[in-house]
Amino acid sequence: MRKLTDAEQEKIKLLTKNQVSLTLIEPTENGLKKSIMDATGSVRSYLKSENIHDYELQKQGTESKVMITAVIHTGFKIIKSQASLYRPSTKKGDPRIWFYSLTKIADPNDIIAITYFDNQFQVFNLTKLDIRELINSSILNPFQELINAINTTENEVAFELLGMLRKIANAGPIPSMVDADTSVGRTLETALGININSSKEPDYKGIELKSFRKKKNSSRQNRKNLFAQVPNWKLSKFKSSTEILDNFGYNRGDDFKLYCTVSAITRNSQGLNLRIDNDIKQVIENSDKPEVGDFVVWTLDKLHNRLKSKHKETFWVEAESTRINGLEHFQYKFVEHTRKPITSQFDLLIEQGIITLDHLIKRTATGSGKEKGPFFKIESKGIELLFPPSESYNLMA
């Protein structure tokens, strides 16, 4: 696909701000003549991630063709259409997609936007359509109605959760449930009536909650936990966390532990660092010990999927910690609301040292072991780089 113009990029930013998830396709002159377009990798990925269609499961031939209702938006009017998704019998059966009547709105090399709402494709010419004018128009139009409906649907649960958080915040500081680093999150989840468990699923009706204490004058201020993910042991030299601990751990009191942060920018005191190998699509952890070298790996596909599933929608809740009668209390004050992380940025932020890895492994004097994570964490400044523009809320307002 050609490079987007500045105007096209601004339109996408506006749509993203209105919670519209979409994919793009560029019809060629030949494609418009023959009523055929290649379903590119980004289109296939969108269809699969949104549970619309999976070309990998589709057989070749016209008998396996899938038809889906579509609406083509021209601004103040719509064209009822259908989408054809198929793999031809010829050659490898490269995935194809076509929208009937597309030639009425598209010229060669226009950028066509595709989203899915109300059980049908919603299609429009991103290059030609005046997105901002239609959304802000005083005259009601089908495109405006579509965007408002998507926005309302996407925000319904978020506004419900925001109302609950404001009630909690306005009730004043809440005593901590436990004396632990994790208490800021556990206390909030308990106040919301959420059961504490180790599930990888989002916390509240599809929204992930991440709570953290407001910190001052810290070089690692407000690093946020993205998700925990063990390495792919089958692809790794080391086959367990015990091996990692045995090779890089240290004695602290009665425990033998490895509590450290690993970055792609520099080696830590244990001689560990990260790197990305884009050719094999892996994040690799390496030791400066010649006899060890590369010892564990994560596949980028797995990390991208964890990021998308865990942070499809997230409330990052900031709390002010105070001590009252010797007991820590939390005043929850601010929320940053993010959606739909950009997975390609995840790789870049690892390379830039903005996303790092934390090991939290220990073995007690009795020989029992314990591991949390490994955790992939992000610096505060990285949030706006990993996610589209977010919304911020003052819970005390």
Image (cartoon, grey):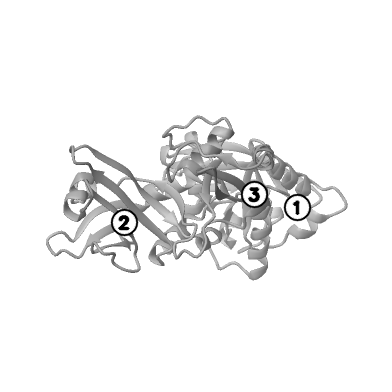
Mark nearest the camera among 1 and 3 is 3
Q: Relative to residue 369, is residue 5 drawn left or right? A: right
Observer able to see residue 232:
no
Q: Which of the marked residues, 1 or 2, is nearer the chain's N terminus?
A: 1
Mark nearest the camera among 2 and 3 is 2
Q: What residue type is labelled 2?
A: Cys
Where is residue 133 drawn, in percent x and y?
A: 80, 59
Q: Mark on residue 74?
A: 1
Q: Which of the marked residues, 1 or 3, is nearer the chain's N terminus?
A: 3
* Farthest front residue in view: 325
Q: How far apart are marks 1 and 3 (CA)?
A: 17 Å
Classify mark 3: helix, strand or loop.
loop
Q: Which amino acid does label 3 sit on?
A: Val
Residue at the spot of label 2: 260
* Farthest left residue in view: 291
Residue drawn at (37%, 47%) of the image: 302
Residue at the spot of label 3: 20
Q: Mark on residue 43?
A: none
Where is residue 328 drawn, in percent x and y?
A: 51, 44
